[in-house]
Amino acid sequence: MPAIDFGPAPQTVLVTGATGFIGRHLVAALQAGGHRPIAVSRDPRGAAQRLGVRCVATPSELEAGVRVDWVVNLAGARILGWPWTAARREALLASRLGPTRSLVDWLATAAHKPRLLLSASAIGWYGVQPPGDDRPLAEDAPPQPVFMSELCQRWEAEAAQAWARARVPVSVLRLGVVLGRGGGALPGLLAPVRLGLGGPLAGGRQWNSWIHLDDVLGAIAHLARRIPQPEGVQAWNATAPEQLRQRDFAAIAARVLRRPALLPTPGWPMRLALGAQADLLLEGQRVHPAALLAAGYAFRQPTLEGALRDLLGRA
């Protein structure tokens, strides 16, 4: 991965969710740039062994004299997986709201305020977009009364308290499907293609909004470098400029992997197995990174074919 410019080194950066897929790559990129990441983890000893940086269980463990330059909040349990029972929904909410609230409590009392809180969210904010709706969704598009949207609304509202209570500017990253090496969504997306079963899913007209991991880190760096930081709370769509229908996504993946992608897959088995969670795969959203482009961010991987060739070594 090319070096990422987070600004003049060394800076101290507090990272929650540091052992997750994005978090561990962010910590490594910060270290490579000469910065000092501090990880927040429920298992600080194990996290320290895995990441090779200082780890704490909560931000309140930091000494009063520690100056944190900026904060990245990535804490949250994986969305896709077990069906969204009432207990599962509560667990997904708690895994986001609790750590974010703890972080804001610390910011409110910290003697030295960080200049920025970058807090993760997801394009689930926009709810679902039926296949016949082709409008690109910019950051000002409204949320919807569905669980994924409500989860993101509450998550973002907790993060916004950093400005209300501590006057720390907040940038919310609404992440699309993150494609990267060594985990994340890519293995699951490519599995049916590798088996020759990567044809259109439920007709294939639903939109896929994705982003290369390098551009997640690049966008974080781009926003962190802004000095002074704009006041208040701002949302940023962290998705590639190229949005694709599922059938086109599958066709490009099959071409890169040199596999057929002809066999269509009905949507009903997935909906039967996953319930409302299936909407994320069967309906999707066409999310446009309007704010990032307007702010001058140049995407490293703006097209899916280039991104997959980079990640799979298929130059």
Image (cartoon, rainbow, N blue to C red):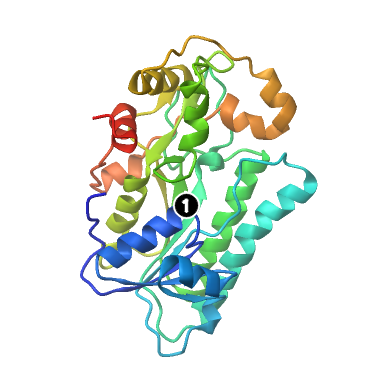
- Residue 264 position (above or below residue 309): above
Q: Is residue 285 visible?
A: no
* Quarter where residue 233 is shown: bottom left
Q: Residue 77, position in %: x, y?
A: 61, 53
Q: Residues within 10 Å of mark 1 (few under 14, many from 20)?
A: some
Using residue 298 as the reference point, say whether residue 78 is left or right of it: right
Q: Residue 31, position in %: x, y?
A: 31, 67
Q: In this rendered view, identify the residue nearer to me: 226 or 22.
A: 22
Using residue 103 as the reference point, say whether residue 288 is left or right of it: left
Q: Secondary structure at mark 1?
A: helix
- Residue 269 position (above or below residue 31): above
Q: In this rendered view, identify the residue nearer to me: 209 or 212.
A: 212
Q: Amino acid at mark 1?
A: Phe
Residue at position x 66%, y 52% in the image: 92
* Quarter where residue 250 is shown: top left
- Residue 161 position (above or below residue 4): below
Q: In this rendered view, identify the residue nearer to me: 33 or 159.
A: 33
Q: Residue 135, position in %: x, y?
A: 45, 25
Q: Is residue 191 visible?
A: yes
Quadrant in which the C terminus appears: top left
Using residue 52 as the reference point, say whether residue 122 is left or right of it: right
Residue at position x 44%, y 58% in the image: 23
- Residue 95 position (above or below residue 86): below
Residue at position x 41%, y 44% in the image: 237
Q: Residue 59, position in %: x, y?
A: 52, 77
Instruction: List the residue tagged with mark 1.
Output: 21
